[in-house]
Image: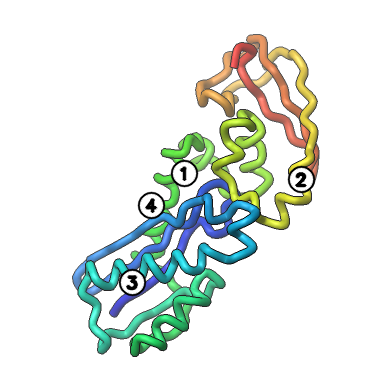
């Protein structure tokens, strides 16, 4: 059996991880769809769907997938073109709710990928919904000029907020256990900081060291 799943398609930051897994032998192949395919021009063309097909085709060659193997595919929209490709190439497949080992592996790989992009590991591990759009906006606005290129800017949801203005003011940190969303280091209580304020779905505050 071959199982195919994705992670990160709903994350504003980063591309999307596509994972292919053979549970009988614990063989696994994964690749990241580049975030550039989610910019405004490429997103309209849905080039990320073509990338899924290319990744799976490469994985099938690497894993030597036979046409008599059953292929399970996640029900998500990411696999629209892949289903056509599987039909055209004579594979036996069906859509299902993917869970278990393959889901864990794909999500873990996407998390490691976003950490390499610069998203703070603590922010991911200790936030209940680490890839929630508005939570990620806080990370993006902490260093906007460098981080916006790492985002799915072709999304309609981003079009609603890309003109957001951030108010910046000097302040003093009154809380403990708060880390700077720009450098990732903790902010000492009582130290001078810069506070960024913006409004998306609600009022958000981003805390930075005064020299960050």
Q: Residue 42: x and y, percent?
A: 58, 58
Residues at badges 3 and 4 in contact (C-beta under 8 Å)?
no
Q: Secondary structure at mark 4?
A: helix
The residue where tag 3 is placed is 57
Determine the CA span between mark 1 and mark 3: 25 Å
The residue where tag 4 is placed is 109
Observer able to see residue 129: no
Q: Residue 104: x and y, percent?
A: 39, 59
| Residue 112 vs residue 157, the one in the foreground | 157
The residue where tag 2 is placed is 161
Nearest to N terminus: mark 2 or mark 4 = 4
Image mark for residue 114: 1
Question: Alpha-carbon neighbours of circle 4 within 10 Å: few (<14), some, or many (≥20)?
Answer: some
Q: Secondary structure at mark 1?
A: helix
> What number of labels is visible?
4
Nearest to N terminus: mark 1 or mark 3 = 3
Nearest to N terminus: mark 1 or mark 2 = 1
Question: Alpha-carbon neighbours of circle 2 within 10 Å: few (<14), some, or many (≥20)?
Answer: few
Q: Secondary structure at mark 2?
A: loop
Which is closer to the viewer, label 1 or label 2?
2
């Amino acid at each position: 059996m071959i199982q195919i799943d994705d992670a990160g398609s709903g994350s504003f930051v980063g591309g999307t991880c596509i994972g292919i897994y053979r549970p009988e032998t614990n063989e696994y192949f994964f690749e990241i769809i580049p975030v550039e395919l989610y910019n405004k021009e490429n997103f309209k063309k849905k080039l990320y769907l073509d990338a899924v097909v290319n990744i799976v085709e490469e994985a099938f060659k690497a894993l030597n997938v036979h046409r008599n193997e059953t292929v399970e595919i996640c029900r998500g929209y990411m696999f629209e073109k892949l289903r056509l490709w599987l039909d055209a190439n004579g594979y036996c497949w069906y859509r299902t709710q993917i869970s278990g080992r393959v889901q864990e592996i794909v999500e873990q790989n996407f998390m490691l990928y976003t950490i390499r992009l610069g998203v703070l590991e603590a922010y991911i591990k200790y936030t209940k919904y680490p890839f929630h759009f508005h939570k990620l906006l806080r990370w993006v606005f902490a260093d906007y000029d460098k981080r916006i290129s790492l985002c799915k800017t072709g999304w309609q949801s981003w079009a609603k907020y890309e003109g957001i203005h951030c108010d910046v003011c000097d302040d003093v940190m009154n809380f403990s256990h708060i880390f700077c969303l720009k450098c990732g280091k903790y902010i000492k209580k009582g130290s001078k900081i810069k506070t960024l304020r913006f409004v998306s779905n609600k009022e958000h505050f981003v805390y930075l060291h005064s020299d960050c």
